[in-house]
Image: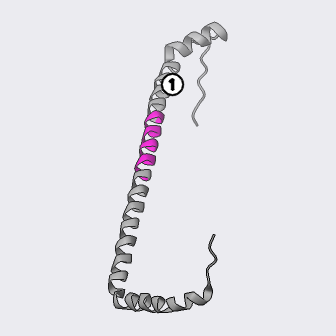
């Protein structure tokens, strides 16, 4: 491994001066290049975010559809369980209930 002699490096100070003068001379190109790079990176980032949001939206729509199907099944089940003939059969078999006869009916006066 070579040792670098700092005294010999002093001759390269002119190089730094040339680089600085080139940056001053081409500063417009440097600014426009930086803007173009920033624009490119922002376009890539926004495209990535857009795709993530679209994927999330699709998941939410699938979940909504599954909830809709479950809701329809629950409505069908509710309608089946609330049929009058089913309720009447359960009341008669399990609770021993029956329809009252005319003699068992009591009318309550309204006022």
Task: Determine the secondary structure under disc 1.
Answer: helix
Local crowd size for mark 1, using a 10 Å CA cut-off: few (<14), some (14–19), many (≥20): few
- Judge whether residue 57 is colored magenta: yes
Q: Looking at the rendering, which quadrant does residue 95 occupy? A: top right
Give the colouring mode of the picture: one colour
Residue on which disc 1 sits: 78
For the C terminus, the quadrant is: top right
Residue shown at the point (46%, 33%) measured from the top left = 66
71 and 66: which is toward the camera: 66
The relative height of residue 79 versus residue 30 in the rendered view (above or below) is above
From the viewer's perspective, is 75 left or right of 87?
Answer: left
Instruction: Write the start and end of the magenta stretch as one range.
Output: 53-67
How many labels, in total?
Answer: 1
Residue shown at the point (46%, 23%) measured from the top left = 76
The relative height of residue 29 versus residue 74 in the rendered view (above or below) is below
The picture places residue 72, in percent across and down from the top left corner, at 44, 29
């Amino acid at each position: 491994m070579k040792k670098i002699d700092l005294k010999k490096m002093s001759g390269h100070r002119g190089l730094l001066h040339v680089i600085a003068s080139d940056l001053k001379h081409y500063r417009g190109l440097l600014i426009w290049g930086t803007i173009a790079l920033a624009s490119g990176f922002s376009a890539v980032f926004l495209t990535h975010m857009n795709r993530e949001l679209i994927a999330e939206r699709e998941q939410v729509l699938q979940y909504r559809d599954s909830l809709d199907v479950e809701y329809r099944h629950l409505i069908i089940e509710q309608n089946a369980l609330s049929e009058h003939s089913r309720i009447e059969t359960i009341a008669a078999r399990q609770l021993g209930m029956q329809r009252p006869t005319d003699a068992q009916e009591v009318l309550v006066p309204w006022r």
